[in-house]
Every structure is written in structure tokens, then in C-alpha cells.
Amino acid sequence: MSHKLKKRMEEGVKRWVVDISKWDPQPCEFSVALSLLPSHEHSSVTRYFKTEDQKRALISRMLQYALLNDVIKLNTPFFPPHNFIIKRTSQGKPYLDLLDYDKLGLTTYFPNFNFNVSHHGDYVAIASEPLCLVGIDIVSFDMPKKETVTEFIHFFSSYFSSSEWDNVVNAGTCSNDVLIEFYRYWSLKEAYVKAMGSGLIEGLNKVEFSHTNWTNISATMDGKVMALWRFWLLQLGEIHCVAIARGPPLSADMSYKSTLKKVDFTEDEYNIGLHLPNEDFVELSVDQLVSILQRTFDCEHKS
């Protein structure tokens, strides 16, 4: 693969995050932001009763459309308006439904473009990949309100290997250390499940994560190294972390696999995607998202 082609593929690796705690919109501001989304998306935002939940849902969808406009439309200058929509699988994973994906030449640089979103606490984030599956999961290190940390984490013990569980319960002398260790492992497991587009978490105890101070993260399945996967865990602010999983399209859940552009790759093709650099997160403001979508909205209406 030429250096130029690889650099173009790297443009499909995006990591964007928004701190929604910095956004306290007036009703009119919220309505303007919502109006920039396709009308069929509005009910997925307004169906929530709590304002914070509406904010997370709105920013999640704004991130998806803004990222697609940034990656897809900027790489296809003659992109026709209203030519793609975001759909969701039966398991709730969003995917790009794009007419004429091949004719637009996107398969050259983004042979299997896909993305995933997550929100928890103060943050909403999105990650995309040009070839590999991608899963992302944010967790806020919230203390349980109606039970002790021990009671809270015990419910999830069956999803951990014995080694992982030992690391969690022996993470420190205070309950906060134990809780943070638990959340870090859990976010990795969630990112792995979300990458595959599966809502199922049974058997996660067979997926065991190892790390060096939460760097150089690797995983085994039933003791066998998962060489076709890569994982990262990053801190977000003071009390959040975000996990990213990158893996093979052949591992996708059946409902999600049917939405992918391409599933079978040669070993050399796949390794290029697997070993693309993992980009740093770019923090965007809501105003920046509005600006991206407003430009797109204006262009489409002129067309």
C-alpha cells in the first residue's frame, strides 16, 4: 500500500468528545441545535423526560452527523445532498446507510467505514474506523447511591475472569480504588461488545484483559491471545475514562455484519487497518458541532 493511500485511510480514524457539562442551553438554543438533525431523529431526543438525558441524546446524534460530514463529504467533493442516513441495528448500533458508496470511490480509502458512540456522566464521544470494527465506551466513576461498592460490583462478578476479579477487589485500601478498577475493566468489556454490535454480554468472563498500568492492553479468549484485536483506555477529565476496541469485521454480530461494506480482508489488508495510529481525542464544543451541521444544512438547502 502506498504512503498516500495509508494517510488517506488514517483520515477515517476519528476520536471526538464533547463535555456537555459546559453546555447549558436556553430552550431556543436547544431547538436550533435539534433542527439541524433530520426530522426522523427528533423523537429519539425528545422522548427523554430529563434535560440531561435529552442533551446526551442530542449531542450523540449531532456528533454522528457532524463526523460523517467531516469524513465522508469532505472526501467526496461532489457528494449529493441527502444521500445518506443513519440507521440502527436491532441491537441499537448505529451505522451509515449510504447509497452509491462504491460509486463515490469511498471503498478505496474507507473499505469498511463504521463508527460507534457512547455517553455517560459529563461526556459524549464518538470513534470511527475505515476498516476495522470499532467500539467505544465511557464510564463515570460514580459511587453507588443505594448500596455499598462491594454490593454494587458483586452483581457483575460473573462477567470477569478470576484474575480480573482479583485485581478489582485488591485494587486498593479504599472503596473508591476498587470502584475505579472495576469501571476500567468494565468499559473495556463494553467497548469489545459494542464493536461487534452485540447486545449480549454472556461469556465475557472468558475475555480476559491484561495491561501495564492500563497501557499495552491485550486480551485473551479462553486463554488464547486475541491477536486480531487492539484496545486502549484513556482518562477523560478527573472522574471519567473511555475505552476503545478495534477488531475484525468477521467478528460482528449477524445483524450488524449485514450492514458492513466489506467483511473479508486478506491478512495484509486487515493488518493495515489494525495497526493504524489510534488518534488522540479532539474535544469539540457544542457551538463547533452546530457550525459544522449548519454549513451542511445551508449547502443542502441551496442544492
Image: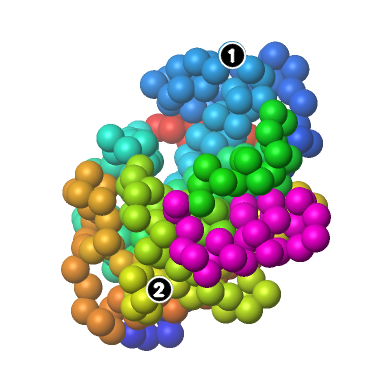
Identity, as a three-letter code, of the amino acid under mark 2: Thr
Q: Position of residue 188 (x, y in %)?
A: 52, 59
Query: Does residue 36 belong to the magenta stretch?
Result: no
Asked if 44 appears above or below 7 in the picture, the reply is above
Could you say which is closer to the camera, residue 77 or residue 264? 264
Identity, as a three-letter code, of the amino acid under mark 1: Phe
Q: Quadrant of residue 29?
A: top right
Asked if 302 appears above or below 235 in the picture, the reply is above
Q: Position of residue 302 (x, y in %)?
A: 45, 30
Q: Position of residue 92 (x, y in %)?
A: 36, 36
Label annotation for residue 202: none
Q: Main secondary structure of the magenta part?
A: helix
Q: Quadrant of residue 211?
A: bottom right
Which residue is pictured at 39% across the width and 21% down the height? 40
Using residue 232 as the reference point, say whether residue 169 is left or right of it.
right
Q: Which quadrant is home to the C terminus? A: top left
Answer yes or no: is residue 109 visible.
no
Q: Mark 1 sits on what residue? A: 49
The part of the chain drawn in magenta is 158-183
Using residue 146 as the reference point, say whether residue 34 is left or right of it.
left
Could you tell me how far apart the alpha carbons at marks 2 and 1 are, in whole angstroms? Answer: 41 Å
Q: Mark 2 sits on what residue? A: 220
Q: Residues within 10 Å of mark 1 (few under 14, many from 20)?
A: few
Which residue is pictured at 55% across the width and 54% down the height? 187
